[in-house]
Amino acid sequence: MKYLIVGLGNIGDEYSDTRHNIGFTVLDAFAAESAVSFRDRRYGFIAEAKHRGRNFVLLKPSTYMNLSGNAVRYWLKKENIPVEKLLVIVDDLALPLGSIRMRPKGSDGGHNGLAHINSVLGTNEYARIRIGIGNEFRKGNQVNYVLGRWTGEEKDLIKERIGIVVDMIKSFGVVGTELTMTAFNRMSKLPALKDQEKEGKKEKEADESRS
């Protein structure tokens, strides 16, 4: 059984390790864990991994974000994979940093990569995992924030969350979307980083008051 797992992002060193490229980062982690490498192929970089008898075709489109649908359509057809076995990993400004949401279908939510995939495939009925990148930026600075690199604190949090998403990809292949959502969506909710810092400060103050 074969699945197409797509991580959205932009190619080029200037986009490496940026918030908008978290889809690429997740697939890099999956490939590293599976001891496989990406190859430069048509419309993207491809790696193939196996888990419990399932074959995962990992795709990092080389079309740039806004034309991601071209790569997705090509590789679905080439590998003869139905859209029901497609999973897209994407960043989401509307979610708190580190939060994870899986859905079996849905709108593009203002994300240009998802919008192009929806348009090219003619459907939005495919699974997707959204990873919150937060929205702690000043008015008018959205582009710089999205295309900016993680801060040290953010990177520590995101690294742990990426491991969860890798497990979700495996679960998607083994038990499907609905059971994966049931198992992971509740544990994948996180408060914003600043709220976590507040809670940490409160705990520290409480500890000091008891000492």
Image: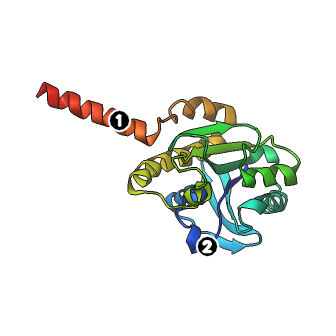
1 and 37: which is toward the camera:
37
Q: Position of residue 61 (x, y in %)?
A: 71, 64
Residue 25 picture quarter: bottom right
Q: Are marks 1 and 2 in contact (CB under 8 Å)?
A: no
Depth check: give the residue in front, 72 or 137. 137
Q: Is residue 26 above or below residue 130?
A: below
- Horizontal side, residue 137 vs residue 81: left or right: left
Q: Read off the residue under disc 2.
A: 12
Towards the viewer: 33 or 118: 118
Residue 143 drawn above or below residue 45: above
Quarter occupied by residue 202: top left
Q: Secondary structure at mark 2?
A: loop
Quadrant into which the C terminus falls: top left
Kindly indicate the quadrant of the structure image that contains residue 43.
Answer: bottom right
Residue 92, horizontal then vertical, whole percent: 62, 46
**Secondary element type, mark 1:** helix
Q: Residue pushed farthest right?
A: 122
Residue picked out by circle 1: 198
Inspect this view and state whether residue 81 appears.
no
In this picture, is 149 found above or below 53? below
Q: CA distance from mark 1 to mark 2?
A: 36 Å
